[in-house]
Every structure is written in structure tokens, then in C-alpha cells.
Image (spheres, grey):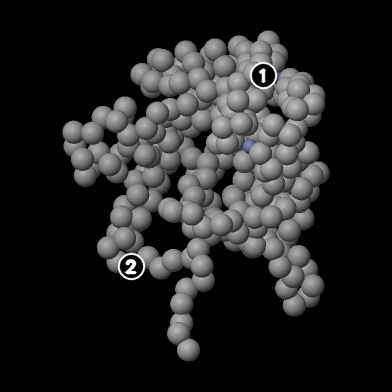
Amino acid sequence: MKFQSVRGFKDWLPEEFIRYEFLVETAKKILKNYNYQEVKISILEKTDLFVRSRGEVTDIVQKETYTFQDRNQEFLTLRPEATAGICRMVIENGLYMKPKPLKFFTIGPMFRHERPQKGRLREFYQIDVEFFGNLTSWYEAEVIKMSINILYSPLKVFYKEVENEDLFTLEINSLGCERCRPNYKDYLLSSLKGNQNALCGTCQQRLERNPFRILDCKNSNCKNEIQKLEPINKFWCENCKLHFEELSELLNFLGLKYVFNPYLVRGLDYYTRTIF
Ligand SMILES: [Zn+2]
Ligand SMILES: [Zn+2]
């Protein structure tokens, strides 16, 4: 019998692990400088936590998690991301009673049962940052600045001549708030439903479950349809507009170059306002 690791899971040998550890240590230092506190949450959660987090089955829970029943027939899920677990931690331990803001981060493995692609594993590592309190554009700018520092600092050690601009482009968008986001969702649905057959198979399913994901589909037909629509910023309410303007000004103030991309979305349904 030949022993092999599970598909999408891998070993970290010493040379690679040194790089991993260096990146993690650098990230921890940066995050602690911004007063983010490290926490460790469990890897296994009750499946309900992910299914009920928004009262609907998200794209990810439906087909992309490791979900199974244990010996007591309880449904459990290996965490696909850390946000739901940290929210559970805050509620379960009554941390919401403490003075805000609460700033937490956690670093560790996440699990998603998707088709392994180049550079994508089923067990992968995330640095997760969570903010509880009045999320002003100032704190958002802070998270963006931290993220760039985390990406940039380790590389700077190895490649002294590297400039930020050579490494990545910062793209930002706002998905709107609980008030204005549903208007854009309705608009997307009503505009795309009449012409469903022009979309790829995946997007036809997304139309029911998660229409925002259609915005970043790589299929050229889908791209074509999206180009015909009004961009999301036309639907922002006054508060969201103001919030986005403030964020743009702060990024300018911090000397961070960015591109506004109205088609930038996230895989999970619960995001509002700024994404990057
Ligand atoms: Zn809004
Ligand atoms: Zn598509």
C-alpha cells in the first residue's frame, strides 16, 4: 500500500516552513502595532453556524465545505473562513459588553472542498482581521494599510529595490449598506433575468443564489452583459457615497494608489460597504 496525502492538502518541509513562519511573524508584529489582538478559535464548528449566519445557504456552504456527521450524528463543518467563528466567540463570551472597538486577528488553516487549482489548496492559510464597533472609513483605511504592509514587508527584506507598485494594484469598491445594497440586487436580478440565456451556466445558477458573483465572472459573454448595466456606485445612498469619499481621501493622504473597480465583489453574501 502506498501512503499519500489527501488531495489538496500538503506538507510543509523545513525550507518552506521557514518562509511561512517569517511571513506570519511579520504579520503578527504589524497587526499588534495597530492594536489588533491575536485570538485562536476552533477549527471545527457546528454546521448551523455557517448555514444560519445570514438565514440562507451561501455559495460556499452549499458545495464547498468539508461537512460531515460525527459519531453522535451532529453536523460539523471544518471552518471555510474565520469570520463566523470569531463572531460566535464574541457572542459566546459576552465580549460585545466590552468597550469598543474590539480588534481581533487570527492566523491558521481554513478548509474548502473546491477543485484544487494551481496555487490553491483545500487546506490553506488565512490571516483574518475582525473589527467590532463603529467602522468608520478611518478604520477601513487602517486595515488596507496593514494589509499592504503585510504583503510588502517580507518581500522588501528579500528584494530591497522592489516598489509597491510593481507588486500589486489596490482595487477598491463599496457594496453599499443594508439600505441601498438590496436596491442594486433587485436591479441586477430584474436586468439579468430577461436575458438569462446570455449568461454562462454557473451565472444562471448564481442569479438565484448570489447575483453579485456574476459581476466578476471571467466568461466573456457574462462580461458583455455586465458592461451594459449601471455600475453599483449609481445605487449608493448618500451615507455610502460620503463614506466612500472619505475613504478615498484617507487613502490619498496615506499615499496609497488605488483603482476604483465597480465589479469587484466577494464570494460570501454578507459583505457590505468597502471591499478591496
Ligand atoms: Zn448605503
Ligand atoms: Zn458567468
The residue positioned farthest toward the left in the image shown: 161
Few, some or many residues within 10 Å of mark 1 (<14, 14–19, 20+) = few
Residue highlighted by disc 2: 13
Which of label 1 and label 2 is nearer to you? 1
Q: Quadrant of ligand 2?
A: top right
Q: Which residue occupies 29% across, 30% down?
A: 166
Q: Is residue 257 visible?
A: yes
Q: Position of residue 272 (x, y in %)?
A: 66, 29
Q: Position of residue 245 (x, y in %)?
A: 54, 12
- Residue 1, compared with residue 9, is above or below; it is below
* Secondary element at tag 2: loop
Residue highlighted by disc 1: 229
Looking at numbered disc 1 in the image, what kind of residue is underneath it?
Leu
Looking at numbered disc 2 in the image, what kind of residue is underneath it?
Leu
Residue 147, picture quadrant: top left
Q: Earlier in the sequence, mark 1 or mark 2?
A: 2
Give me the C-alpha separation between circle 1 and circle 2: 49 Å
Residue sitting nearer the eye, 102 or 121? 121
* Secondary element at tag 1: loop
Q: Which residue occupies 18% across, 33% down?
A: 161
Few, some or many residues within 10 Å of mark 2 (<14, 14–19, 20+) = few
Q: Position of residue 131 (x, y in %)?
A: 58, 36
- Residue 37, compared with residue 228, is above or below; it is below
Q: Which residue occupies 79% across, 26% down?
A: 194
Horizontal side of residue 120 vs 64, given as left or right: left
Residue 132, picture quadrant: top right
Residue sitting nearer the eye, 201 or 214? 201
